Image (cartoon, rainbow, N blue to C red):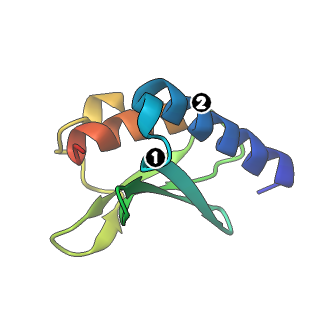
Amino acid sequence: MSKETKQEVTKIIDDFNKRNFHDYVEDLAYFAEFKGKFLYLKRKEFGKISPIARMTYTGDIKKWDFAIFKWSREEYDPEEWFFPGVEHVDGTIEGAMKAGLKAYPV
């Protein structure tokens, strides 16, 4: 994944945080960890870090593969499609963050 793609991802996440968490961005916000072709979406929640989803870069910033974090097994599961918020999963980073808010409400 290129430096430019990572910068674009970071901007998408920052914009989402500003729109959805307003005054709480310091204490409540999504952030990204990049490892190879993977983007790990995590959420900072008042001092606690929670994994939300793993996205796989396909070469298109608007077409990521999605895997929700399953607390029951403590792993990412690309086969799990029965969870609150699944209707938001559309291949975009914003869709994944919306799904994360439904699956794991703050």
Label 1 neighbour load within 10 Å: few <14, some 14-19, many 20+: many
Q: Which mark, by number, is residue 80? A: none
Say which of 9 and 38 sits in front.
Answer: 9
Q: Amino acid at mark 1?
A: Ala
Q: Position of residue 56 (x, y in %)?
A: 56, 55
Residue at (84, 46) in percent of width and height = 4
Under tag 1, what secondary structure?
Answer: strand
Q: Is residue 47 above or below residue 62?
A: below
Image coords of residue 95 (percent x, y) = 43, 32
Quarter where residue 69 is shown = bottom left
Looking at marks 2 and 1 on the same chain, the residue that comes earlier in the sequence is marked by 2
Q: Quadrant of residue 32?
A: bottom right
- Residue sitting farthest toward the top: 19
Quadrant of the image for the C terminus? top left
Residue shown at the point (59%, 30%) measured from the top left: 15
Q: Amino acid at mark 2?
A: Asp
The residue under label 2 is: 15
Pointer 1 residue = 29
Estimate the x, y position of residue 101 in percent, counting from the top left.
30, 39
> Secondary structure beneath disc 2?
helix
Query: In the picture provided, is 25 more to the left or to the right than 72?
Result: right
* Residue for point 76% across, 57% down: 1
